[in-house]
């Protein structure tokens, strides 16, 4: 069934109950963008669906701290040129919360955008095909930074994002995360620059094969 | 907001969902903590009800909040507000987990062990017992076919074609019963 099938309205019940396979779910979501009457009905019925889940149960006490510190770690992911100044304001707090190292580096990066790197006099750009679309990399020796422009990539799917790693001696270190509408800047390092698809919260190590692997020497 | 620290002991700081989500979208960790404090039990409960596995429910709770943290800018206020939004994200993720880890056979056995009118979930806690009694009462007002279609999907993670096959009914019947079952549930809850 596709989004234009006259019968597609009838998927509304299963859609609300999360009882569709991914393909039909996508078709119905596309239909929703075009069908005001289904949109209205979905909005009206949603609270009743959520009521079926209304059995509050407090999570274990340690979870709050774990989630908040995880959020603090992934803060840099959400950086966009528009938001940079506001994010910089919380950077100091994050620095205290997480401490040292990589966050300090990323905080410095807050002042630089991918556009700055691509505009550098000595920039070298590379358009790299991946199975999710093209990635444009820009490297400036002078700035000692690599820009990763992911805006030609496709949506990695619900709950997923792209993660950038520097991999050396068999160990990958996460340096940034971004979504398909974003570009990020990461510091230049030794080893191999890699991009993988990961859950939005980020992974401790790559959990999928790299979409792209580029030795620093080739940048 | 100046002198935030002084206000910290006066929750909730952000009365409006839009305000809270805008602060989170701007990277405000205090606002994020507030979101957690207000909705963690609802999110965790929704996950636990489907998963019945504390470790997995905890994982889903974490994913839901981190998704809210990352996706705060995409939040649009809707009927039912933040609680509905978060609970339904939790439910959908829990269903995805159930589908990926539990073979359909195991889910059928699990569904078969449950009495038709028994709705799974953590033991009722006193605070919400009254509200939950409304939900239960309204579920009991559904026709058997509506009830079975809704609960097999929502609590056991079956897709509507699986339910149609299981019950030996046409696909169109199951789709329709889900939709009119939910409409009846909505009407009943509004009266309650
Ligand atoms: Zn429609």
Image: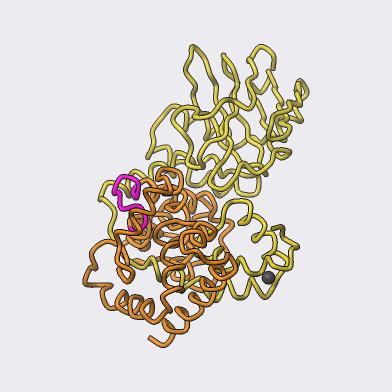
Q: Residue A79 magenta-drawn?
A: no
User: Residue B30, located in which quarter of the rendered image?
Assistant: bottom left
Q: Is residue A18 above or below residue B182?
A: above
Secondary structure predominantly adopted by residues drawn in magenta: helix
Residue found at x 51% / y 42%:
A200
Residue found at x 34% / y 66%:
B11
The image shows residue B77 at horizontal and vertical percentages of 55, 68
Tell me, yes or no, if residue A76 can be seen here: yes
Q: In the displayed image of the protein, which residue is found farthest to the bottom? A: B191
Splitting the image into four quadrants, where does ligand 1 fall? bottom right
Q: Residue B52 magenta-drawn?
A: yes
The image shows residue A54 at horizontal and vertical percentages of 36, 68
Residue found at x 53% / y 46%:
A159
Q: Camera-side residue: B97 or A205?
A: B97
The image shows residue A167 at horizontal and vertical percentages of 53, 18
Q: Is residue A26 above or below residue A80?
A: below
Q: Camera-side residue: B64 or A17?
A: A17
The image shows residue B50 at horizontal and vertical percentages of 37, 56
What segment carries the magenta color?
B49-58
Residue found at x 37% / y 60%:
B46
Look at chain A in the picture and name its colour. yellow
User: Residue A125, located in which quarter of the rendered image?
Assistant: top right
Which quarter of the rendered picture does the C terminus of chain B lie within? Answer: bottom left
């Amino acid at each position: 069934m596709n989004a234009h099938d006259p019968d597609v309205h009838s998927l509304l019940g299963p859609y609300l109950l999360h009882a569709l396979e991914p393909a039909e779910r996508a078709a119905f979501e596309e239909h929703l963008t075009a069908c005001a009457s289904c949109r209205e009905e979905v909005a009206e019925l949603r609270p009743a669906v959520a009521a079926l889940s209304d059995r509050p149960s407090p999570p274990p006490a340690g979870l709050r701290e774990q989630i908040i510190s995880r959020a603090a770690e992934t803060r840099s992911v959400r950086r966009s040129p528009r938001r940079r100044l506001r994010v910089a304001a919380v950077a100091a707090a994050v620095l205290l919360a997480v401490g040292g190292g990589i966050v300090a580096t990323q905080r410095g990066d807050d002042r630089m955008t991918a556009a700055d790197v691509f505009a550098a006099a000595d920039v070298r750009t590379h358009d790299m095909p991946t199975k999710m679309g093209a990635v444009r990399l820009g490297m400036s020796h002078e700035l000692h930074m690599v820009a990763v422009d992911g805006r030609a990539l496709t949506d990695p799917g619900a709950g997923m994002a792209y993660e950038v790693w520097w991999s050396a001696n068999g160990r990958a270190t996460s340096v940034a995360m971004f979504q398909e509408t974003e570009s990020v800047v990461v510091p230049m390092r030794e080893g191999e620059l890699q991009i993988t698809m990961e859950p939005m919260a980020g992974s401790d190590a790559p959990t999928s094969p790299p979409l792209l692997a580029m030795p620093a020497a080739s940048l | 907001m100046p002198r935030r620290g002084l206000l910290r002991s006066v929750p909730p700081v952000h009365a409006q969902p839009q305000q809270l989500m805008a602060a989170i979208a701007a990277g405000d960790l205090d606002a994020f903590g507030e979101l957690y404090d207000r909705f963690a039990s609802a999110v965790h409960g929704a996950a636990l009800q489907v998963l019945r596995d504390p470790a997995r429910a905890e994982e889903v709770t974490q994913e839901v909040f981190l998704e809210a943290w990352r996706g705060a800018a995409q939040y649009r206020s809707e009927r039912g507000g933040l609680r509905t939004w978060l609970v339904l994200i939790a439910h959908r993720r829990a269903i995805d987990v159930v589908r990926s880890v539990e073979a359909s056979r195991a889910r059928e056995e699990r569904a078969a062990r449950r009495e038709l009118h028994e709705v799974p979930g953590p033991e009722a806690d006193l605070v919400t017992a009254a509200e939950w009694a409304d939900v239960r009462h309204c579920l009991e007002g559904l026709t058997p076919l509506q009830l079975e279609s809704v609960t097999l999907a929502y609590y056991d993670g079956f897709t509507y074609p699986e339910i149609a096959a299981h019950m030996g009914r046409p696909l169109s019947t199951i789709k329709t019963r889900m939709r009119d079952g939910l409409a009846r549930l909505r009407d009943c809850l509004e009266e309650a």
